[in-house]
């Protein structure tokens, strides 16, 4: 296995251990581990972060070069992962990237390793996804297809040559905003408004936002970069069902399905490589219609059911369009509001 692996962790020792157990089966020669620091307003974060970091030393027992970097301060969900990936690409020309709640199938590593090597110098390809959002539909007779949409939150891979275009503040957005560029990619007006809102928010705040993945989409799209999507789901999100989860307690929850919590399916080898490099339009349109637009509608419906302060919070935070992030941040906001001192009879409650 040529590609190094980057594992991004925070404060969950249990999920970190499960993901590391799968990485151990692949035995990468080089393993990078980045850990974000504890949040200053969470008393138990320091202990939890330390526990997650201790798991690394306990479970990395194969012959590999282990390179660790742990932040003393909390960088957050935007700057944290982005800086971790940039750190790796100071030392490697390619990498397989997993977060502590992304459980990979053993064949995920071989799949990524082979396509990272095959397309190492091919500027047309910028991303390798671990997720498949076609729900059983096989789009081609090959092992994977090409898409305009990447799914970095589910385990993925890329190259230094591609990541150099990533910019948390999306400085290119001003040049592209008034053109038909975004419409040509996403086609649907509601989807276009969705991404435009994310890009506007990131640019207006100079990249000081709690997400980095929308910026990665802009980086790839601005270069006409394609994503490799496997014809099977190779990574599952195990954050659902975790004690910190709110609504996604079951694996068959609709939101969990939409964000990749599907049954894993092995990739078959040897790989059958496509004989062409072009976008599979049918797959992209299916993803928009069956995943993106329904998730936006679910977000709107959830906001409508909540009391005023939470609904306003969701509406004004474009980063919360991802259902997984939405539910996580919603829970945090709700707990914070519920723990605040009572100021009158209309104390916030969550249905």
Image (cartoon, helix red, strand yellow):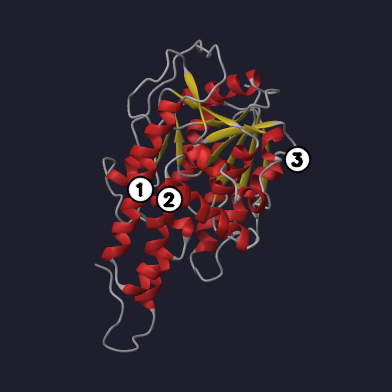
Vertical position of residue 202 compared to residue 183: above or below: below
Q: Which mark is residue 90?
A: 3
How many neighbours does mark 3 have within 10 angstroms: few (below 14), some (14-19), or many (20 or more)? few
Please tell me whether mark 1 or mark 2 is closer to you in this view: 1
Kindly indicate the quadrant of the structure image that contains residue 263.
top left
Going by the image, does 122 lie left or right of 246? right
Whichever of callouts 1 and 2 sits on the residue coming sooner in the sequence is: 1
Residue at 55% across / 11% down in the picture? 275
Q: Quadrant of the N terminus?
A: top right
Local crowd size for mark 1, using a 10 Å CA cut-off: few (<14), some (14–19), many (≥20): many
Asked whether residue 123 appears in the rendered view, the answer is yes
| Residue 233 visible (yes or no) | no
- In front of the other: 317 or 81: 317
Q: State the image coordinates of residue 238 (x, y, percent, origin top left).
A: 39, 42
Judge from the rendering whether residue 53 lies leftward or rightward of residue 337; answer left or right: right
Residue 322, numbered label: 2
Instruction: Tell me the residue at 61%/63% (across/down).
Output: 204
Residue at image point 36% right, 40% down: 291
Q: Give SS at disc 3.
A: loop
Closer to us: mark 3 or mark 2? 2
Vertical position of residue 19 compared to residue 342: above or below: above
Task: Compute the Cα span from label 3 to label 2.
Answer: 29 Å
**Marks 1,2: beta carbons within 8 A:** yes
């Amino acid at each position: 296995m040529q590609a190094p692996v980057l594992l991004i962790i925070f404060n969950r020792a249990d999920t970190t251990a499960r993901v590391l157990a799968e990485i151990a089966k692949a035995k990468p020669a080089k393993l990078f581990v980045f850990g974000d620091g504890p949040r200053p307003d969470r008393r138990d974060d320091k202990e939890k972060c330390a526990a997650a970091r201790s798991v690394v030393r306990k479970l990395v027992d194969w012959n590999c070069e282990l390179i660790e970097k742990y932040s003393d301060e909390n960088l957050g969900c935007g700057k944290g992962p982005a800086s971790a990936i940039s750190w790796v690409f100071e030392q490697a020309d390619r990498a397989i990237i997993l977060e502590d709640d992304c459980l990979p199938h053993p064949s995920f590593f071989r799949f990524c390793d082979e396509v990272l090597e095959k397309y190492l110098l091919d500027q047309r390809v910028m991303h390798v996804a671990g997720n498949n959002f076609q729900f059983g539909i096989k789009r081609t007779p090959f092992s994977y297809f090409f898409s305009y949409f990447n799914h970095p939150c589910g385990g993925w891979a890329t190259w230094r040559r591609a990541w150099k275009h990533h910019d948390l503040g999306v400085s290119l957005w001003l040049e592209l905003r008034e053109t038909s560029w975004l419409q040509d990619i996403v086609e649907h007006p509601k989807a276009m408004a969705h991404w435009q809102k994310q890009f506007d928010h990131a640019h207006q705040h100079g990249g000081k936002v709690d997400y980095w993945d929308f910026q990665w989409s802009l980086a790839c799209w601005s270069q006409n970069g394609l994503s490799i999507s496997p014809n099977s789901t190779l990574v599952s999100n195990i954050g659902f069902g975790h004690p910190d989860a709110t609504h996604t307690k079951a694996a068959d929850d609709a939101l969990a399905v939409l964000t990749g919590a599907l049954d894993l399916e092995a990739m078959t080898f040897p790989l059958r490589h496509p004989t062409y490099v072009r976008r599979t339009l049918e797959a992209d349109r299916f993803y928009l219609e069956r995943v993106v637009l329904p998730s936006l509608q679910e977000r709107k419906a959830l906001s409508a059911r909540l009391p005023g302060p939470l609904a306003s919070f969701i509406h004004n935070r474009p980063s919360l369009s991802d259902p997984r992030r939405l539910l996580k941040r919603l829970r945090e906001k709700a707990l914070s509001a519920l723990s605040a001192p009572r100021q009158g009879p209309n104390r916030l409650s969550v249905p």
